[in-house]
Image: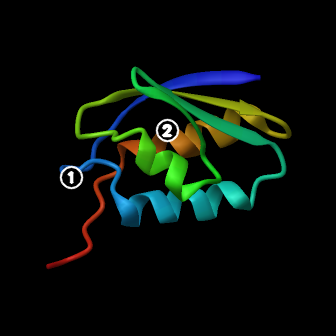
């Protein structure tokens, strides 16, 4: 099990579109990916659970990965949460 910290980098937070992209990436992973915030815990494979975290910009999250290639997968998901998503207008 590997746990890394991430700070939400998107200026609108982790809303529906980023949640969908993160969940799709998580669904490709055979292990488990859990996201912890001050407001709760979410399975990264669930868009609704990610939305339930209400992770606004600057929110600190802990990402825990359990399964194959844990360290690499944890780093990848830190990047997904810290990324700025530009979906245009």
Secondary structure found at label 2: helix
Badge 2 vs badge 1, beta-carbon distance below 8 Å: no
Residue 16, how many percent across, how many down? 38, 63
Quadrant position of residue 60: top left
Residue 49 in view = yes
Residue 29, how many percent across, how many down? 76, 53
User: On the rendered image, what quadrant is the C terminus found in?
Assistant: bottom left
Quadrant position of residue 74: top right
Q: Going by the image, does 27 lie left or right of 8?
A: right
Disc 1 packing (10 Å; few <14; some 14–19; many ≥20): some
Whether residue 33 is situated above or below residue 59 in the rendered picture: below
Q: How many marks?
A: 2
Disc 2: which residue: 78
Q: Going by the image, does 60 lie left or right of 3?
A: left
Whether residue 3 is situated above or below residue 49 in the rendered picture: above
Seen from the viewer's position, the closer of residues 26 and 48 is: 48
Residue with the most extreme left position: 89
User: On the rendered image, what quadrant is the N terminus found in?
Assistant: top right
Residue 53, how many percent across, how many down? 42, 38
Q: Going by the image, does 50 lie left or right of 2?
A: left
Residue in view at x 34 percent, y 39 percent: 55
Residue 40, how many percent across, how many down? 48, 27
Residue in view at x 49 percent, y 47 percent: 50
Residue 26: numbered disc: none
The colour mode here is rainbow
Disc 1: which residue: 12
Q: Earlier in the sequence, mark 2 or mark 1?
A: 1
Residue in view at x 50 percent, y 64 percent: 21
Residue 80 in view = no
Secondary structure found at label 1: loop
Seen from the viewer's position, the closer of residues 67 and 34 is: 34
């Amino acid at each position: 099990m590997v746990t890394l910290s991430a700070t939400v980098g998107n200026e609108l937070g982790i809303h529906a579109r980023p949640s969908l992209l993160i969940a799709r990436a998580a669904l490709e992973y055979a292990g488990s990916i859990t996201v912890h915030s001050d407001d709760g815990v979410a399975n990264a494979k669930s868009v609704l659970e990610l939305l339930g975290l209400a992770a606004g910009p600057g929110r600190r999250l802990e990402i825990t990965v359990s399964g194959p290639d844990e360290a690499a997968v944890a780093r990848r998901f830190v990047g997904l949460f810290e990324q700025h998503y530009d979906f245009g207008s």
